[in-house]
Amino acid sequence: MCGIVGYIGPKEAVPILLSGLKRLEYRGYDSAGIAVISCGKIHSRKIPGKINDLIGVIAKEPLPKAGLGIAHTRWATHGAPNKVNAHPHSSCDRKISVVHNGIIENYLKLKESLISEGHRFVSQTDTEVLAHLIEKFYKGDLKDAVIEAIKKVEGSFALGVVSADEPDKIVCARQDSPLIVAEGRAGRFIASDVPAILEHCRRVVYLKDREVAVLDNNGIRVFDLNKREVRFKFDRVLMGAQSAQKGGFPHFMLKEIHEQPAVLKRLLSSGAREIRRFSYPRKIKNIVIVACGTAYHAGLVGKYIIESLARIPVAVDLSSEFRYRDPIVDKGTLVLAISQSGETADTLAAVREAKKKGACVVSICNVVGSSLTRESDHVFYTLAGPEIGVASTKAYTAQLAVLYMFGLELARSLKTISQNSFKASWKVLNSIPALQAEILKAHRSVEKVGRKHHKFGSFLFLGRNINFPSALEGALKLKEISYIPAEGYAAGEMKHGPIALIDEYRAVVCIAVSSRIYDKMISNIQEIKARSGKLIAIASAGDKAIRTHVSETIFIPKIDEFFSPLLVALPLQMLAYTIAVSRKCPVDQPRNLAKSVTVE
Ligand code: AGP
């Protein structure tokens, strides 16, 4: 996810663009850049790093006064977060400048064809293709050139375009990435999100997919891809600037919980291509997964996935343990390192240890250009966008999705799965975003349960089989944001000790979705009920029996147990969130924690 902003009007563009960019920094902060038009020329500044670094550069090398410009803060998807890959990107003649949020899926094919036509590229980004494509189609009308260019593009985009030959207008367009245009006394704006313009105006137009808008000093006009002018209406933005950065949600964590269907949809299209392209080693003796915290729980689910599909032994290690136990790793080992930040010191150390022993390292990571991605032999990005909340949510289910896709492709390359079951599995995966959205729509049922149980002094989370790690993850979510002692356990382990803990003061969350071991889970539930434990069940829609055992049940759509961790995670995240909010905890920044643990 990136942030774009543009301005045209009577005021000085640079300060307006920079302050607008600051309010979009939550969308990405790998690199930043700005371009303004003055005296018929485009002047730009770009840096790897945060917007404050860009402000510092401009203070040292001021840009000329200008009433028009575009700016960008980047969350890298293609190409490391360095200066050459920072936006804006230019055409060969440097007369066209583009900022973009999204993913151009067919950029390689377009780039090859543009190079064959003589275009010279300087970056590794997909975005630069847009600048050269618009240049190719430019015949004196920037709007027409943008329309012709985006007709060739597959993927998602919100883009802002300026041209030195038409210094009095900004052209913008969108497809699957958010983009607003706005106007007020100070001028006219484009932005990825309303926070960027809130200090100037509240009249916004939420551009629709495949619409192109032209902003100049006379007003705003909107066109369809047939170059026909279309009607549009202004909406009035009511939310305050701070809450708008969270998309209207009270916390980044809740916003990120709700982003999961969109993240998964993006992964199942763009991410899948990466995973299909990977050349799966023929001779893998064993797989070792190294990770910490939530990523470790994703790795535990990954063991069930990969062993079941590819029939290769998988060991899952806490990174902090792996590096000291002289692990059985050699050139026949594939090491999967999972990390949202890509900067977790223990996981980096584990990867270095694995490489010393000759293993091939593939990382599953959310941050392009992070240390882990630079030290891995191959990277599968989770494309979840910046995860601001310290408690990992959308990155977790994105890690799971990559593990499912990886397991399926590995099984296909090793011929341990039939073509039919491969296709059937993909069909289920593709149904998950809508099922997740269904769960999120029913959030009130989870909130009710959370509010009712927020005073409990301790929780136990129980799961079996592929949802045993889901129980561990549910416990971690709760404890790290509400500070309530919470333990995750394999339900079958109850009678080997934990059942001594059960009494009327302990809440027990049981993951009892439909599965071949459902009856075993019911027996555990009965054991807990017999000892007055306060039961909460996560069950499958249509399960009538569960209500005879448990009074508080959160239902999720029925799905093959094998894929259920992708759904079970959501009510557990929302339960933890509701309980923490009810206890007035600082959900996005829990005490003692950091988003990325860069110390050992
Ligand atoms: C998860 O909610 C926690 N914030 C924490 O356990 C986290 O998963 C862990 O520190 C690993 O971080 P990473 O994924 O960035 O490596």
Image (cartoon, rainbow, N blue to C red):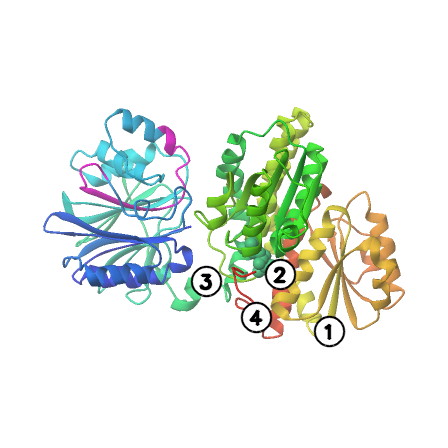
Disc 4 target residue: 592
Say which residue appears at 38% left-offset and 53% top-offset. 30
Give the camera-side residue of 51 and 152: 51
Point out residue 488 in the picture as x, y percentages from the top left corner: 73, 59
- The residues tagged by marks 2 and 1 sit, at their Cα atoms, a distance apart of 18 Å
Residue to which mark 3 is pinned: 246
Residue 95 place in picture, x, y as percent: 17, 41
Q: Amino acid at mark 4?
A: Asn
- Tell me, for residue 574, which label it has, or none: 2
- Number of disc labels: 4
The span picked out in magenta is 91-109
Dot 4: element = loop
Q: Position of residue 357 (x, y in %)?
A: 60, 40
Which disc, if any, is residue 457?
1
N-terminal-most mark, 2 or 3? 3
Instruction: Decide: few, some or many residues near mark 1? Use Cα within 10 Å; few <14, some 14-19, many ≥20.
Output: few
Q: Is residue 183 above or below residue 167?
A: below
Q: Is residue 322 visible?
A: yes
Amino acid type assigned to the residue bearing label 1 in the image: Gly
Look at 33% across and 45% down and name the residue there: 85
Label 1 CB-ligand 1 distance < 8 A: no
Viewer-nearest of labels 4 and 3? 4
